[in-house]
Amino acid sequence: MPVPADSASPFEWLVFEQAGVLTYRQAVAAVGPGVVRHRLASNRWQRVSVGVLVTRPGPLGVEQQAWVAVLAAGRGALLAGLAAAAAGGLRGSWKRTAVDVLVPGERKSPDLLRRLPHELPAVKVHRTSTLPEVDRQRARPDRTSMARSVVDAAAWAPSDDEARAVVAAACQQGRVLPEELLAVVDRLPRARRRRLVLTTATDVAGGAGSLAEIDFVRLCRVRRLPRPDLQRRRTDASGRTRYLDAYWEAFGIHAEVDGGHHTEIRQWEADMARHNDLWIAGDLVLRFPASQIRSNPETVASQLLRALISRGYTPPKERSR
């Protein structure tokens, strides 16, 4: 939508700022009920719910859908969760089936949300009694802060895997700092998946550079294996700076977590050369595909444990029952 000219009316600016989506009350206050009825009757405008209008015909874009959700939810509503995170720049392919909106805890679910057209995404209203100013962000439309949006998106995600992926992506894309997520979780002691957010944010802060590496660290923690250093910087024989996925310096063991890009021929050749340098230097190098860490963690953990023991590691004794 083009930016209005300096001489534009307050109504034109309102239409611009709200991506062409208005409440019925806003439209009537600006141009009168007769003009509103005429523009709807002539199909210049469209009514998307009892209380919300769009000032042009045709399908709605993502920004307009967000405005419809917030305006339909009524007083105090904020765009929230994955929709708010995406509006703030989070990238990714997520299983989003609804636009999430956060409203004050004392609010009732507005009836008009139940009357949205079927072609629009569903709107899911969540209530909260904890929404300090630091968790709000002035935007178009107003939304929760990126940190609060990510924590809520993790809580409302359809699975633990997607929740973990959202938290990791937000940190890795530089949209939020791990400590900001930890601060939000601290304010929400009863948040769903609170521990998942805490551990994922902590793992990212500890150097995990991908979701596969986060899964790897989680595997080590669950199997009571020593935590490796992540993304350890190292200079190879040619003087290039390389980063080791996971490294136990005390035992001279390096574990490589292979994603799909490692199957590309140039990447594969570079990996082989790097691993040869490590072997020549005396390190033991283990390689695991990312899929195996999730599908067969027992084998991965067993091989890691055997490698660590071969280099002098003593496993902790099992607690007596």
Image (cartoon, grey):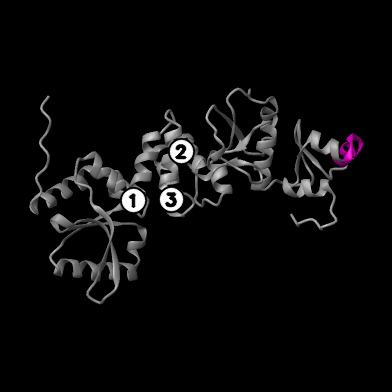
For the magenta stretch, what is the residue range?
31-41
Callout in the foreground (2, 3): 2
Is the residue marked by circle 1 packed among few (<14), some (14-19), or many (20+) residues within 10 Å?
Answer: many
Where on the picture, by quarter, is residue 125?
A: top right
Quickly name the residue at label 3: 171
> Can you say whether 2 is above or below 194 in the image?
below
Q: Nearer the viewer, residue 138 or 35?
A: 138
**Residue 240 locus on image (x, y percent):** 29, 73
Find numbered disc 1 in the image and state the secondary structure of the residue it sits on. Answer: helix
Q: Amino acid at mark 3?
A: Cys
Q: Residue at horizontal 43%, vertical 50%? A: 171
Q: Report the residue that reaches farthest toward the front.
A: 133
Mark 3: give few (<14), some (14-19) or many (20+) Cα within 10 Å.
Answer: many
What residue lies at 75% left-to-right and 46% top-to-bottom?
20
Secondary structure under tag 2 reads helix
Q: Would residue 186 be counted in the magenta stretch? A: no
Q: Which residue is mark 2?
A: 184
Which is more foreground, mark 3 or mark 1?
A: 3
* Marks 2 and 3, how far apart at CA: 14 Å
Hey, what amino acid is under mark 1?
Ala
Given residues 215 and 150, the one toward you in this image is 150
Q: For the residue marked with disc 2, what is the amino acid?
A: Val
Give the Cα separation between the discs numbered 3 and 1: 14 Å
Residue 255 occupies quadrant: bottom left
